[in-house]
Amino acid sequence: MRSWATEVEFLLPGGRRKVRPDGVWQAPEIGVPVLMVEVNRSTMAPADVAAKFPRYRELFRTRVRDNDPALADREPADRTVHWWRRTWPGHTRAGYPPVALVVTDAGPVALANRQQAVADLSADCWRGRWCREVRDYNDDGWREYDDAVPIVATTLELLAEHGPLGPVWWRFGRSGRHSLIEALENPNNRAAYDLRQAAREDEEHKAHQELMDSLVCIDCGDVPEQESTWEYGRQGQVEWTRRPGGRCWPCHQDREERLEREAEEQLEAARTANAVLYLDGLILPGGAARSGELPHEAAAHHLLAQTGLSRRLTHVLAVDYTPPTATWSASTSSSTVASPTAAPPAPASSPSVSWVGPWPPPRPPASPTPSPAVPSRSSSTVREPPEGRGSRSPNR
């Protein structure tokens, strides 16, 4: 400790009011250039004790002209400095010089309640200004102490037991008791906020990386950097969102094109097989169709065995082929009745009906029944009368 003085008076701006601390302690060798001390013997109301601290702040706000030659080129308003920095140089903390409150002459509970009451009534002087970083997107923040008076409190009994450097000081705005150097550190400042923000960002980065690892592409193993991206495809710009167990955009495009090609190839193969079945007259290997089975159903079963396509697709494709002509033709051994585009008549051995067209065929028309021959009456035909009636004998 370099110096200890009592009942030192400081004039406030205007020269009419004074601030008179009970003691002024100087210990620059431990990082405390000056410490104002207020002693309260529990005879003054907490509100009166708290009313002293706004005057300390007004005193510490006073600025004087700085005659430093390095500041000669600056504006007059910029060539000022707080008077206490020139009087007690060596301050390294933000804010004003600290003020210590020492209470005594009461029980431990009463002294603790008095300290808390003074802290609540003087919060505007020591709390500091609340600040937030909008770009961090949270409700957290910190306090700036440029215009705050650091206030520490203790009891005379604790000072006598542990000394001024022991863990006896309670900093207004913090919990617990600390040594003097620790108590003078500003709580919840920007440095503390930066530590909390760094921890939050680490947690967010870890959670984001875990999410990205769950969105790995099942084809190429690509790990995305973002969950959703804007991509360009055949339909224009689209927002592509990755899903667990899904694919990246290039692999998705390749898969869609491959499936489309395979579908076209299967469709072409089915049409080719359908055409072969049609040209073969739907005659299945090994004989006729199954019992109770229509011809187009038999064609579907044959197509299923030949191509390996799905059962639903074969039933659809077995009737897909449409020939250029579709007519019914009926042939008999004696005559043929057909449309103008009828197929050639069948052999004369037995009647047969065949369909040339898509399956299933419509109901065949009724076979035409030849009508009995009716002789036509002609003017050149002469009927002979029966014998014995009106006939004249040539000899008669």
Image (cartoon, helix red, strand yellow):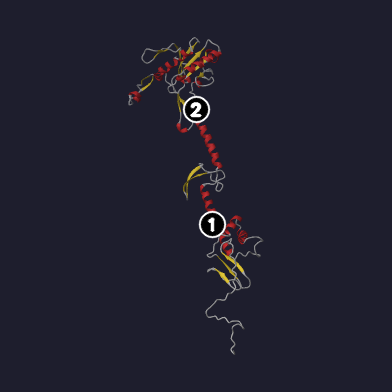
Element assignment for label 2: helix
As drawn, 279 above or below 198: below
Looking at numbered disc 2 in the image, what kind of residue is underneath it? Answer: Ala
Other residues around mark 1 within 10 Å, as few (<14) / some (14–19) / many (≥20): few
Residue 144, horizontal then vertical, whole percent: 45, 25
Residue 356's image quarter?
bottom right
The residue lying toward the viewer, choosing from 87 and 352, is 352
What residue is shown with label 2? 192
Would residue 59 be found to the left or right of residue 378 on screen? Answer: left
Q: Looking at the image, which residue sits at the far bottom?
A: 395
What residue is shown with label 1? 264
Residue 298, horizontal then vertical, whole percent: 62, 61
The residue lying toward the viewer, choosing from 228 and 3, is 228
What quarter of the picture does the C terminus occupy?
Answer: bottom right
Mark 2 or mark 1: whose residue is earlier in sequence: 2
As drawn, 65 above or below 356: above
